[in-house]
């Protein structure tokens, strides 16, 4: 099963992902963030402190599909936090790498071998960014979220710590 959890900053996305993953036995956390400054290092430490024991941690900021394939061999659930930072790092790797890596991820999601939970940011609800590069990133993030949501079995939108089920393919 593929689950996509989206919402704004500090809406409870990561906490909801951890809650969903509670019952999994062999679970892995793939972190896409890089501690590029002190503030990001503090955010990463806070996220680590919120995770209970029993998680295997992997860090990957570009080759996400490869990492998922490796980790899926030994785990029954993978939580990726987050697609937004992954896309940001892909942008730094170049346009061709970005296209290839997104394509690889979407192909993998068509037949996942384990349960996967993605955390992502909904960045298109606010003001239109002034800078062209920021507008392009916002648009690209929106398109990536749409593509992952289309392939997901479940999509959850977080608002003020409350989950709103947008899609649940397993409801009768």
Image (spheres, rainbow, N blue to C red):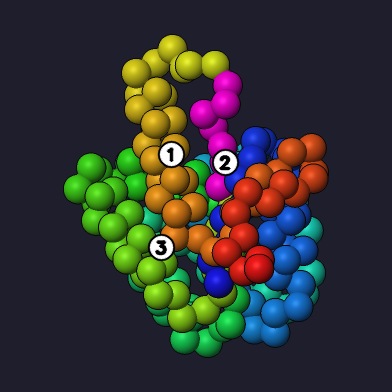
Viewer can see residue 85 = no
Residue segment shown in magenta: 120-126
Question: What residue do we see at 33% from left, 41% from top?
Answer: 91
Of the numbered discs 3 and 1, the one sitting upstream in the chain is 3
Quadrant (top left, top right, bottom left, bottom right) of the N terminus: bottom right
Tell me which secondary structure the magenta stretch mostly adopts. loop
Of the numbered discs 1 and 2, the one sitting upstream in the chain is 2
Of the numbered discs 2 and 3, the one sitting upstream in the chain is 3
Give coordinates of residue 97: x percent, y percent.
Answer: 24, 51
Question: What residue do we see at 79% from left, 69% from top?
Answer: 52
In the depicted structure, whether residue 139 falls above or below residue 75? above
In the depicted structure, whether residue 161 falls above or below residue 53? above
Residue for badge 2: 121
Q: Is residue 169 left or right of 138 when viewed as pictured?
A: right
Name the disc covering residue 141, or none. 1
Question: What residue do we see at 75% from left, 49% from top?
Answer: 163
Give coordinates of residue 61: x percent, y percent.
Answer: 43, 55
Judge whether residue 124 is colored magenta: yes
């Amino acid at each position: 099963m593929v689950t996509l959890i989206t919402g704004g900053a500090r809406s409870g996305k990561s906490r909801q992902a951890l809650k969903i993953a509670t019952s999994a036995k062999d679970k892995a956390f793939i972190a896409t963030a890089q501690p590029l400054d002190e503030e990001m290092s503090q955010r990463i430490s806070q996220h680590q402190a919120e995770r209970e024991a029993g998680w295997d941690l992997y860090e990957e900021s570009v080759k996400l599909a490869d990492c998922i394939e490796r980790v899926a061999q030994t785990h029954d659930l993978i939580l990726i936090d987050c697609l937004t930072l992954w896309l940001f790092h892909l942008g730094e790797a170049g346009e061709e790498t970005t296209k290839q890596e997104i394509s690889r991820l979407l192909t993998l999601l068509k037949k996942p071998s384990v349960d996967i939970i993605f955390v992502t940011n909904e960045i298109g609800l606010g003001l239109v960014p002034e800078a062209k590069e920021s507008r392009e990133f916002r648009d690209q993030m929106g398109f990536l979220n749409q593509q992952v949501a289309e392939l997901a079995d479940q999509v959850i939108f977080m608002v003020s710590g409350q989950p709103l089920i947008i899609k649940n393919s397993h409801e009768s």
